[in-house]
Amino acid sequence: MENHTNCDGKPEMTNQISPDNLRGGREVETCPEAQTLYHYTDFNAMRGIISNGEIWLWNLRRMNDSQEMQYFIKELKIAVRKLLEPEFYARMEQLFSENLKDFDTLSSYASCFSEYADDAAQWTRYAKNGMGVCIAFNREMLAKIGDAGHAPLCKVNYSRNCDNLEIVKDLASLIKTESNGSTEKIRETFNRLITSSPLFKHPSFISEKEYRLVSLPYNVTEYLGEPHFFVEETNIKKYYILKLRNVCTALNLKYADLFEEICIGPQARVTKDVLSDYFTSTGMGELCKKIKLSECPLRRF
């Protein structure tokens, strides 16, 4: 694997398993320009993001979609099978089995955002039933930070099938080839498959209109640093840290410009004045004018 260094001194991947392939490859949608993205969370996490300059990336396989990373593989096999005659079915199963034998041991880590502002469903799911906060991020800045921090910003795809993806035709062609093609071609094609898998979700989640800062499923520690662990009463969760403030400094970006709005949840006890005083006390007074109250009529039961 050919390596170069990125702005943080860590190697930058330049072969087929690269951030550019993960975000803008033939299997995924690239991020549109000039868009605000929204992160629903609680006030303690807001402190970590804004005051500490960090955002945490969590294991996708431990999130609320039980088919994370698996859904794409399942739908892809269905689509490939449609292009094959029955005599090639066994060869297809063999090729998938051999090249995905370690897939269940791989995980991508991500931090999630939405296109939707002040959304009732996301206040309920991700912001303590509306008692939390929603941070509006400048999409263009966030994308630059993700690229430099080895966690590119990607749009999630909610397609019900994979029939029109180029990789489907590529895999069908490999399977039909008597020799199954060269080893390098097979490896490259399945690497594309694996690195695209975090960007496809079951269509029942389409209402979230999600974007992700997402790591590659390979060599996570090499590119994001050592893992951290969040210890709860009944669980321990592994995560990685993307240092937003440090990357902004390295890219010569003004950190406060990353945040376009701070929206206090519809059921939150925190007032605008208290949050404003907090930002001022932590040296983030520029955000005081960006505070707003939710207009969502969410009711607690």
Image: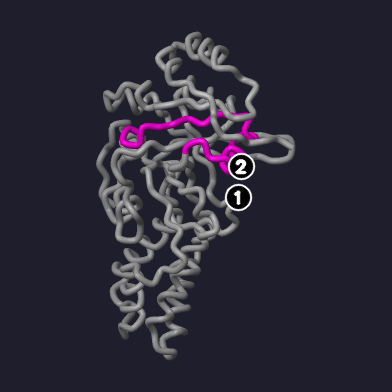
Residue under the image location 29 percent in, 49 percent down: 20
Location of residue 290 by image quarter? top left
Kind of element beneath mark 2: helix
Closer to the chain start, of discs 2 and 1, is 1
The quadrant the C terminus occupies is top right
In front: 148, or 222? 148
Residue under pointer 1: 64
Residue 17's tag is none
Residue under the image location 44 percent in, 14 percent down: 284
Vertical relation: 269 (above or below) 138: above
The x, y position of residue 120, in whole percent, is: 58, 40
C-beta proximity under 8 Å, tags 2 and 1: yes
Eye-nearest disc, 2 or 1: 2
Residue range in magenta is 117-141
In front: 292, or 20? 292
Direction from residue 165 to residue 107 in the image, left or right: right
Residue under pointer 2: 125
Residue under the image location 54 percent in, 17 percent down: 272
- Is residue 174 located in the magenta-colored stretch of the structure? no
- Is residue 128 located in the magenta-colored stretch of the structure? yes
Q: Is residue 10 visible?
A: no
The x, y position of residue 210, in whole percent, is: 46, 47
Task: Look at the image and name its color scheme.
Answer: one colour
Q: Is residue 68 visible?
A: yes
The x, y position of residue 143, in whole percent, is: 33, 38
The x, y position of residue 282, in whole percent, is: 49, 12
